[in-house]
Amino acid sequence: MASTPLNLGFLTVVQEGGAYLGGYLVTNIWGRPLEFRLSSAVQPNKVQQILYAGTLVPYICGELIGKTLVEKASVAAQYVLTCCEEALDLRLKIDCPVAWLAPADDPRAALQLPNGTGGLVCHSSQPGDVAALQELLQQIEGNLDLREPFSRIREAITEARKMGVTSRSSAAA
């Protein structure tokens, strides 16, 4: 019986000029890319800003962008990591652990990354995710720097902008 390969999802959301754009990279345990997706830009209007108030950015990052990218991906990830704290609410919409890669000194970090490079913060409503993420850290020990894929995503977003890809909805690479 073949075991399911371990895939990791890396989600980032960048903000420029009032618009939000997401990138989602699914890799194998060694960081090899399996799928990359971009969201279309989301620019909330003034009425939305007023009505959503403090919940607007988590809604945009976690639900509008994050959930859409994860659901449209053809390669499933068993864990989703994000460098965007506001995207943690994605955990409320999907069935796999989601963790924010926080600064090493963040007191909310339930787990520390090797070499003091940061910590993992889980959604407060999902305390069981801590044990799952601890297992993940043991499985990838030495194979993958969990911060590195985010720089690839940011570079890919920059290149996609140059090519005009970001004007299309969820481009896959």
Image (spheres, rainbow, N blue to C red):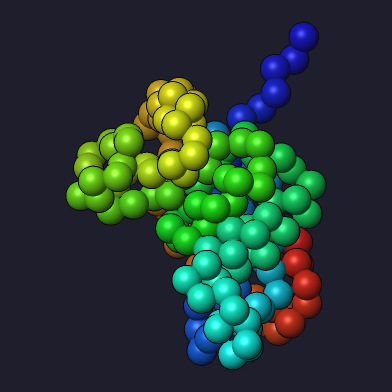
User: On the rendered structure, is 162 left or right of 153?
Assistant: right
User: Does residue 57 appear in this view?
Assistant: no
Quarter of the image with the N terminus is top right
Determine the residue positioned at 53% across, 43% down: 98
Query: Where is residue 104 shown, x and y percent of the image?
Result: 24, 48
User: On the rendered structure, is 1 left or right of 147?
Assistant: right
Relative to 76, is 24 above or below?
below
Query: Where is residue 152 shown, x and y percent of the image?
Result: 51, 61
Relative to 83, is 112 above or below?
above
Q: Quadrant of residue 153?
A: bottom right
User: Does residue 171 appear in this view?
Assistant: yes
Q: Nearer the viewer, residue 84 or 157?
A: 84
Relative to 78, is 108 above or below?
below
Determine the residue positioned at 74% across, 82% down: 167
Residue that protrudes farthest toward the front in the picture? 51
Q: Nearer the viewer, residue 170 or 152?
A: 170
User: On the rendered structure, is 56 left or right of 5?
Assistant: left
Determine the residue positioned at 70% across, 17% down: 3
Query: Where is residue 57 shown, x and y percent of the image?
Result: 52, 70
Quarter of the image with the C terminus is bottom right
Number of marks present in the image shown: 0
Query: Where is residue 24 shown, x and y percent of the image?
Result: 62, 57
Q: Quadrant of residue 121?
A: top left
Relative to 166, is 93 above or below?
above
Q: Nearer the viewer, residue 64 or 120?
A: 64
